[in-house]
């Protein structure tokens, strides 16, 4: 699906027309509801809309937890590379040590994750199907694996790319409904089968230039059997463990690796925020008029704009000037953002130190540097400790935002886990437990230090 260039408020695409076909069949007007791709399954179970249609793939996990229509389109997973690398990267086995992008919560993602230990490439997960191809053209990725119709659409908008001809896997698009909504699912199945018989569905696929030799075989298999076999639609690479416990155990190593990324990123970003925050606070107190003006402007601009926007500007907006690695962009984005907040904490703490103590220190002949180091700084640090701890816990949670620039941290890994198992309950509880395990010791340490320093004073 995409916005109509003549009217961006209008959504168009193959799935939009299939949705309109289904709506007409039950006497309703179609209404488009925008949600993230990985949230489609959860939203349909909540009742946010009746059916999800946006390249939703037929997988065993999805079929076990939701009601799925008969498949209406068969796709191929294909490898897209830069044109200059067409002869060098013909298959996944050629990508050892390289970065391969895909869309989270898809057959392509599972395929890449399962093949990575053998082929030795790095899987980079995205929340949309546009940025993987722009990053490929910009040199941030070496290849992208996604459905062939997504790849073909990307080639029309992003020059210099090439699709390798061999299919890595095959899958089928379906509509997803709430698990209990089997009656509506059966009505939609009847409408889709009729559209296959009378040519209405073929006309839609031809209109969007996606009709090929695979579709007649798909139509024949759907019309010749009462229901599709789950083992036919998804490739073998997507077969998931049967039980919820087995699936959870399989994802635990990935969650723990992602939690280490979250912890490392948060610690480094907080260190940057503290260091730069001290510089900003000191400059606003001890600096000249120009320094105070510039540092004050920085604080107000950073605090007045969303950190998500700052991450996008650092990673995508500056790519024409400097191509920052995703982790570096995430570190700078969080660190520089939180430095503005830290600077206000430190500035307030420094100003809270009694003026009488400062005057007494000057009377004793101490320089401003010695006063800061021996008198003002230690007292200000004790005052700033509690809000600093709060900021670090907040930064730990805000690190979830860096998934938009392809860093797979704890929340992103949990979202992929939840999408693939078809439920947010257990993945969400595990994610919350890991976050608590990381944040509670820090809070406890801060309270211990506060008590110790309060007793000392």
Image: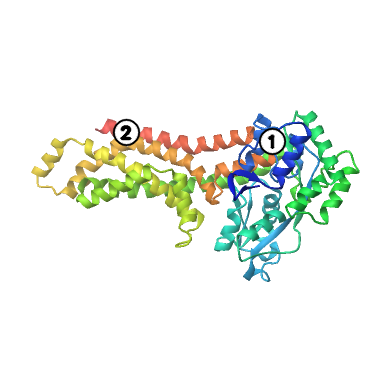
Number of residues whose C-alpha sits closer than 10 Å to that of mark 2, classed few (under 14), some (14–19) or many (20 or more): few
Residue 301 is situated, as x and y percent measured from the top left of the image, at 35, 46
Quarter of the figure with residue 36: top right
Q: Nearer the viewer, residue 140 or 37?
A: 37
**Image coloring type:** rainbow
> What residue is rendered at 64% in x and 64% in y?
81
Residue 228 relative to residue 456: left or right = right
Q: Nearer the viewer, residue 2 or 207?
A: 207
Residue 13 is situated, as x and y percent measured from the top left of the image, at 68, 47
Q: Secondary structure at mark 1?
A: loop
> What residue is rendered at 47% in x and 62% in y?
320
Sequence-wise, which precedes: disc 2 or disc 1? Answer: 1
Residue 271 is situated, as x and y percent measured from the top left of the image, at 38, 48
Q: Which mark is residue 452?
A: 2
Q: Nearer the viewer, residue 136 or 425?
A: 136
Is residue 328 visible to the viewer in this orientation of the structure? no
**Residue occupied by mark 1:** 30
Quarter of the figure with residue 19: top right
> What residue is rendered at 28% in x and 31% in y?
454
Image quarter in which the C terminus is found: top left
């Amino acid at each position: 699906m995409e916005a109509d260039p003549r009217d961006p408020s209008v959504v168009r695409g193959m799935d939009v027309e299939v949705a309109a076909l289904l709506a007409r069949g039950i006497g309703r007007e179609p209404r488009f509801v925008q949600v993230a791709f990985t949230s489609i399954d959860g939203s349909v179970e909540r009742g946010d809309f009746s059916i999800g249609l946006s390249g939703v793939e037929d997988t065993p996990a999805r079929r076990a937890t939701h009601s799925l229509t008969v498949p209406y389109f068969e796709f191929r997973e294909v490898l897209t590379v830069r044109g200059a690398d067409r002869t060098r990267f013909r298959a996944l086995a050629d990508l050892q040590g390289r970065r391969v992008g895909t869309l989270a919560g898809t057959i392509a993602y599972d395929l890449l994750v399962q093949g990575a230990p053998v082929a030795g490439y790095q899987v980079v997960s995205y929340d949309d199907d546009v940025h993987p191809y722009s990053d490929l053209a910009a040199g941030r990725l070496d290849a992208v694996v996604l459905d062939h119709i997504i790849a073909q659409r990307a080639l029309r908008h992003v020059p210099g790319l090439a699709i390798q001809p061999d299919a890595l896997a095959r899958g089928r698009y379906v509509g997803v409904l709430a698990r209990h909504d089997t009656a509506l699912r059966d009505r939609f199945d009847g409408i889709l089968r009729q559209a296959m018989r009378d040519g209405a569905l073929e006309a839609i696929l031809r209109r969007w230039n996606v009709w090929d030799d695979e579709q007649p075989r798909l139509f024949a298999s759907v019309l010749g059997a009462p229901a599709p076999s789950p083992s036919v639609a998804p490739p073998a690479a997507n077969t998931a463990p049967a039980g919820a416990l087995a699936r959870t155990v399989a994802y635990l190593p990935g969650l723990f690796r992602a939690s280490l990324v979250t912890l490392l990123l948060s610690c480094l970003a907080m260190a940057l925020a503290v260091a730069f925050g001290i510089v900003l606070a000191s400059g606003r107190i001890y600096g000249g008029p120009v320094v105070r003006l510039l540092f004050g402007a920085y604080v107000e601009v950073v605090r007045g704009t969303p950190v998500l926007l700052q991450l996008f500007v650092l990673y995508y907006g500056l790519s024409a000037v400097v191509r920052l690695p995703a982790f570096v962009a995430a570190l700078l984005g969080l660190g520089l953002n939180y430095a503005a907040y830290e600077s206000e904490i430190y500035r307030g703490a420094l100003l809270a130190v009694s003026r009488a103590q400062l005057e007494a220190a000057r009377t004793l002949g101490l320089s401003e540097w010695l006063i800061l180091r021996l008198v003002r700084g230690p007292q200000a640090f004790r005052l700033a400790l509690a809000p600093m701890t709060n900021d670090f816990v907040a930064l730990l949670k805000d690190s979830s935002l860096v998934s938009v620039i392809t860093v797979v941290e704890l929340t992103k890994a949990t979202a992929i886990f939840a999408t693939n198992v078809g439920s947010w309950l257990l993945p969400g509880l595990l994610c919350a437990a890991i976050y608590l395990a990381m944040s509670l010791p820090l809070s406890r340490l801060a309270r211990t230090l506060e008590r110790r320093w309060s007793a000392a004073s």
